Image (tube, grey):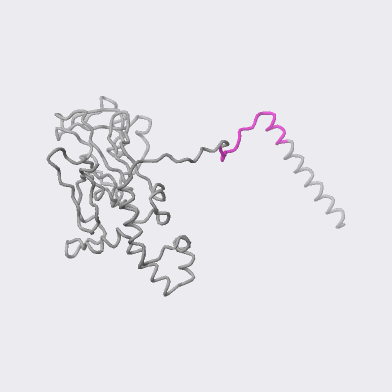
């Protein structure tokens, strides 16, 4: 694909992820419209694409096809599900349609373990999977309208968006509990992780083998009276609370009146001059003390 005759952009585009280029709309050999979101200012930055590919964080062949758009659907937004954000790409940049954060979970009763697997599983017609069983859940379109469709853009990370009612093309190989040998998903193992069963098992193991480590590692759980036997019930209550009121609430926390400054303040010429004189005086006084010590020794 040509980039409007810009040789700098042509030389630098091989270093960039397909969804991170900015500024040109063209038509490739697949008869699709591709958004190139890149700027010549960053075109020469040697961003090694194999770095993220080797770590399994992205798949460039899949990403370039993910943002391709058919010619007869020009300017039709194509939505991506990026971990906790639903985005649509445009030449001006990504537009965030919705977002969910782990720090919202305490409002629904979950005050501990905000970053574990179970915390990731958190419209009336497409209310999603009401009761998690661990089975692969796909949203079926209704007669009146189709479910909201988004493409998964999270690398190898599994989230709870499918149970939330989004229509996301996926494979059950991503789920916890998938057996590569039998090529099947163990729904019971997956259900165990959704309701924090792996956390409960670890709690019981530490209680028996290392009680001191259990007291320190799960101190917040103990403080709130959360035990291994009632973790599943706690997550079920959190799921029900989220479905009852999923609206975003603004935090009452006020921004700080005085912002902390971590970089050094730039000194004026007079301040730099005074600082230099102070350092010279300190060096001279230190040298004078050394001379006095030598005279005393003699």
Q: Residue at x 42, y 74 (%)?
A: 209
For this rendering, which residue is in front, 290 or 255? 255
In the rendered image, which quarter contains the N terminus? top left
| 209 shown above or below 10 | below
Place of residue 89 in the rendered image (x, y in percent of width and height, measured from the top left): 28, 34
- Quarter of the image holding residue 37? top left
| Residue 198 to residue 76: above or below | below
Residue 227 shown left or right of residue 77 in the figure: right
Frontmost residue, 26 versus 187 = 187
Point out the image quarter for the C terminus: bottom right
Residue placed furthest toward the left: 143
The total number of labels drawn is: 0
- Nearer to me, 194 or 62: 194
Left or right relative to 44: residue 5: left
Outermost residue, top side: 5
Q: Residue furthest front?
A: 244
Start-end of magenta stretch: 259-276
Instruction: Name the residue: 25% across, 45% down.
Output: 152
**Above or below, comparing residue 81 to residue 296 in the picture:** above
Identify which residue is drawn at 25% across, 56% down: 132
Locate residue 297, reporting x and y percent.
85, 57
> Between residues 239 and 113, which one lies in front from this camera angle?
239
Magenta run includes residue 191: no
What is the x, y in percent for residue 286? 77, 47
Residue 273 in picture, x, y percent from top left:
70, 32
Q: Quadrant of residue 84?
A: top left
């Amino acid at each position: 694909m040509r980039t409007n005759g810009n040789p700098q952009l042509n030389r630098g585009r091989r270093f960039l992820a397909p969804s991170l280029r900015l500024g040109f709309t063209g038509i490739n050999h697949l008869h699709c419209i591709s958004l190139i979101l890149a700027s010549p200012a960053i075109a020469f930055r040697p961003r090694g694409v194999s770095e993220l590919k080797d770590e399994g964080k992205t798949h460039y062949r899949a990403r370039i096809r993910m943002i391709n758009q058919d010619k007869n659907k020009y300017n039709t937004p194509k939505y991506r599900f990026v971990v906790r954000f639903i985005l649509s790409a445009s030449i001006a940049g990504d537009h965030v349609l919705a977002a969910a954060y782990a720090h919202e979970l305490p409002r629904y009763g979950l005050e501990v373990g905000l970053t574990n697997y179970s915390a990731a599983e958190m419209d009336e017609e497409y209310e999603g999977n009401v009761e998690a069983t661990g089975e692969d859940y796909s949203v079926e379109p209704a007669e009146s309208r189709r479910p909201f469709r988004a493409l998964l853009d999270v690398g190898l990370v599994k989230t709870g968006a499918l149970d939330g009612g989004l229509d996301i093309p996926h494979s059950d190989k991503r789920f916890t509990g998938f057996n590569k040998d039998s090529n099947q998903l163990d729904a019971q193992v997956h259900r165990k992780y959704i309701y924090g069963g792996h956390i409960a098992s670890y709690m019981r193991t530490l209680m028996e083998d290392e009680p001191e480590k259990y007291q320190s590692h799960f101190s917040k759980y103990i403080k709130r009276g959360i035990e291994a036997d009632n973790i599943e019930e706690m997550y079920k209550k959190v799921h029900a609370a989220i479905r009852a009121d999923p609206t975003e609430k603004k935090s009452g926390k006020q921004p700080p009146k005085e912002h902390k400054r971590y970089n050094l303040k730039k000194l004026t010429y007079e301040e730099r001059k005074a600082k230099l004189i102070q350092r010279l005086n300190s060096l001279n006084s230190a040298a004078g003390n050394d001379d006095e010590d030598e005279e005393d020794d003699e």
